[in-house]
Amino acid sequence: VDIDNKKIKLQIWDIANLKQLDTALISRFKQSHAVIMVYDITNAETLQSLKDDWYPSINDANQKIRKFLIGNKCDLKDKRAVQIPDGKAAARKLNAEFEET
């Protein structure tokens, strides 16, 4: 990707279906500059899993990594299970920037 005439290398992994992190994935976190953690606003368990399972491993691997917490499926407002203030509170606790899409 070119941003402001600079080449930026992106590596994007979808690790949503992994139940545990392996050492190869943890080593990727050590080398990364940012991580985007996405949860489903219609399923509170997805946010809890990020907080309990994924964040500790990411943070242990690289405390300097820039973190983004993203709530998705905002088009399903009638099925919302995670309120915006709860997402923002989780982001503060995880030292992450917050957004919903």
Image (tube, rainbow, N blue to C red):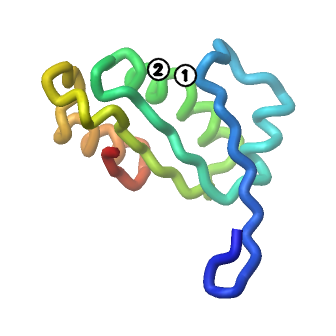
Quarter of the image where the C terminus is located: top left
Viewer-closest of 51 and 1 = 1
Viewer-closest of 92 and 42 = 42
Amino acid under disc 1: Asp
The answer to whether 45 is drawn above or below residue 38 in the figure is: above
- From the top left corner, tell me how far across and down residue 2 is, in percent: 69, 75
Residue 81 shows which numbered tag?
none
> Mark 1 = which residue?
53
> Mark 2 = which residue?
49
31 horizontally vs 86: left or right: right
- From the top left corner, tell me how far across and down residue 45 is, in percent: 37, 15
The answer to whether 24 is drawn above or below residue 6 in the figure is: above
Q: At numbered mark 2, what does the secondary structure look like: helix, strand or loop?
A: helix
Residue lying farthest to the right in this orientation: 24
Q: Residue at x 63, y 38 (%)?
A: 58
Q: Residue at x 79, y 23 (%)?
A: 22
Quarter of the image where the N terminus is located: bottom right
The answer to whether 37 is drawn above or below residue 1 in the figure is: above
77 horizontally vs 90: left or right: left
Quadrant for residue 87, please give it: top left
Q: Are marks 1 and 2 in contact (CB under 8 Å)?
A: yes
Mark 1–mark 2 distance (CA, rounded to whole Å): 5 Å
- From the top left corner, tell me how far across and down residue 78 is, in percent: 13, 23
Q: Residue at x 59, y 23 (%)?
A: 16
96 horizontally vs 58: left or right: left
